[in-house]
């Protein structure tokens, strides 16, 4: 009979580092600023590291995103301000290549920019559930754990967020929303 190896619990790095992209993505959408998002993720990682002995196992991503969310909302309460507008850079956005490819790229950039603008117009609690579900792929239960709200609230908030996002996209495109929305 073989002796089984002693169970070695996973390290902080093994459990948390794979989720840094998701943490940054959530922070970026909540704070609307890249450098602030980087600072928030760094602070959240430091808090998570210090509290790692209290982590009871389970989903490391949800645990880290909960901490990121708290850091972001604390930052927003401390620094109520509007997002910084990005400047247009001719060299970065210009193209000397195939005009058809440039047109397709420009169309994609316009649609992406409209989506970002529409998401930016949503209240933070709607942006949060859209980002966590649609961009990060979290299930309703995971979002409920991160946002510390009931699953039913996640479902209704996500439905309202999608309707509001659609309304904002139509407004940005210069179209009136239909009454069926």
Image: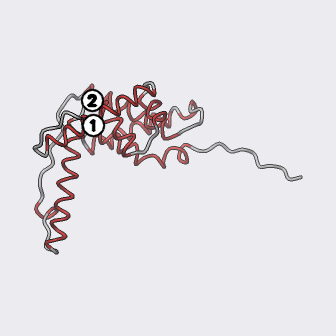
Of 118 and 15, the residue lying toward us:
118
Image height of 134 relative to 92, above or below:
above
Residue 143: x, y in percent?
44, 34
**Could you say which quadrant of the image residue 120 lies in?**
top left
Quote the CA–CA distance across marks 1 and 2: 7 Å
- Left or right placement of residue 11 versus residue 171 in this view: right
Of 172 and 60, the residue lying toward us:
172
**Could you say which quadrant of the image residue 55 lies in?**
top right
- Left or right placement of residue 62 versus residue 58 in this view: left
Which element type, helix, strand or loop, lies under badge 1? helix
Residue 176: x, y in percent?
12, 39
Q: How many marks?
A: 2
Q: Are marks 1 and 2 in contact (CB under 8 Å)?
A: yes
Of 170 and 110, the residue lying toward us:
170
Residue 141: x, y in percent?
49, 33
- Please report the residue visible at 52 percent of the width from the left and 40 percent of the height from the top: 60
Residue 110: x, y in percent?
17, 54
Tag of residue 31:
1
- Left or right placement of residue 32 versus residue 152 in this view: left
Label 1 environment density (alpha carbons within 10 Å; few <14, some 14–19, many ≥20): many
Q: How is the image coloured?
A: secondary structure
- Please report the residue visible at 16 percent of the width from the left and 71 percent of the height from the top: 100
Q: Earlier in the sequence, mark 1 or mark 2?
A: 1
**Could you say which quadrant of the image residue 9 lies in?**
top right
Of 15 and 145, the residue lying toward us:
145
- Left or right placement of residue 101 versus residue 55 in this view: left
Which element type, helix, strand or loop, lies under badge 2? helix
- Please report the residue visible at 11 percent of the width from the left and 55 percent of the height from the top: 88
Residue bearing mark 2: 76
């Amino acid at each position: 009979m073989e002796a089984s190896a002693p169970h070695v619990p996973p390290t902080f790095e093994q459990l948390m580092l794979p989720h840094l992209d998701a943490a940054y993505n959530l922070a970026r959408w909540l704070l609307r600023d890249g450098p602030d998002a980087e600072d928030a993720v760094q602070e959240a990682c430091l808090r998570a590291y210090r509290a790692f002995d209290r982590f009871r196992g389970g989903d490391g991503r949800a645990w880290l995103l909960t901490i990121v969310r708290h850091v972001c909302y604390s930052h927003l309460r401390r620094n109520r301000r509007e997002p910084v507008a990005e400047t247009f850079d001719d060299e970065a956005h210009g193209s000397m290549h195939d005009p058809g490819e440039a047109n397709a790229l420009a169309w994609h950039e316009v649609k992406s920019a409209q989506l970002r603008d529409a998401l930016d117009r949503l209240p933070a609690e709607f942006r949060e559930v859209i980002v966590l579900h649609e961009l990060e792929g979290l299930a309703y239960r995971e979002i409920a754990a991160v946002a510390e709200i009931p699953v039913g609230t996640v479902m209704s908030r996500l439905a309202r967020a999608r309707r509001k996002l659609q309304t904002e996209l139509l407004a940005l495109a210069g179209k009136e929303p239909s009454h069926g929305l």
